[in-house]
Image: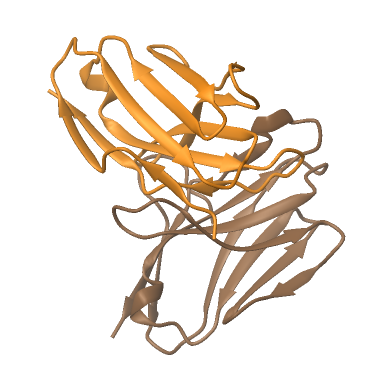
Amino acid sequence: DVKVTQSSRYLVKRTGEKVFLECVQDMDHENMFWYRQDPGLGLRLIYFSYDVKMKEKGDIPEGYSVSREKKERFSLILESASTNQTSMYLCASGAVFTYEQYFGPGTRLTVT
Amino acid sequence: GESVGLHLPTLSVQEGDNSIINCAYSNSASDYFIWYKQESGKGPQFIIDIRSNMDKRQGQRVTVLLNKTVKHLSLQIAATQPGDSAVYFCAYGTPGGGADGLTFGKGTHLIIQP
């Protein structure tokens, strides 16, 4: 079975802190994704990566950056957390040339 | 159907009944469709998928129906159980969409009444 893990299930940070969210997948997938999920807005793509050291902006990249130094690991960075970044963050991975994405359990981030 | 605004559509069914959850998509070029189940506090879980060269696909207690003419997708869950309570949302892929080629619906909240 595909396994996508995220470093934290729940996280509470203060405004202005730098926040790292880590995601690891064990299926040797080329593609990895970061989404945020908010009530009534569904999943919104923040960034994705189709290869090591490659990244592409999604629909809402502002306030975020990403890092992919190894194929299995994709990190989301909030340089200076703000309260409007309180959300559920979901990581996903998928094989190249396929649409199917496998999700991690999510990290519920609260910024106070 | 898919939600607009802050509130998810809700479907309430009796335990043991069949459920039908609907999804509309907009791009006639979409050629791949997935249903996900998301339980409270968890990440989305793949349920079943279908390609555009098919009209119907069956899994264990679930069936996906695709009507390309009206761009409509449905998920049927047979003999619903308490564990089926979750938010269900569709996703569809369109060629040329790149690595981020999946478009996600906003979801329907399925509630199972005892």
Q: Is residue A46 above or below residue A63?
A: below
Residue in view at x 36 percent, y 47 percent = B7
Percent across and percent down for residue A5 are 40, 45
How many marks do you count on the picture?
0
On screen, residue A20 versus residue B43, left or right, reads: left
Q: Nearer the viewer, residue A77 or A3?
A: A3
Q: From the image, which quarter does the C terminus of chain B lie in?
A: bottom left
On screen, residue B92 versus residue A110, left or right, reads: right
Q: Is residue A41 visible?
A: no
Q: Is residue A16 visible?
A: yes
* Picture quadrant of residue A23: top left
Query: Farthest residue toward the right?
Result: B53
Q: Is residue B17 above or below residue A82?
A: below
* Picture quadrant of residue B66: bottom right
Question: Tell me, what colour scheme is on the image?
Answer: by chain
Q: Is residue A60 above or below residue B47?
A: above
Percent across and percent down for residue B34 are 64, 56
Residue in view at x 39 percent, y 41 percent = A40
Residue in view at x 37 percent, y 84 percent = B14
On screen, residue B64 versus residue A35, left or right, reads: right
Q: From the image, which quarter does the N terminus of chain B lie in?
A: bottom right
Percent across and percent down for residue A24 are 45, 38
Chain represented in orange: A
Q: Determine the colour of chain B.
A: brown
Percent across and percent down for residue B73 are 67, 60
Q: Is residue B97 above or below residue A9?
A: above
On screen, residue B7 versus residue A16, left or right, reads: right
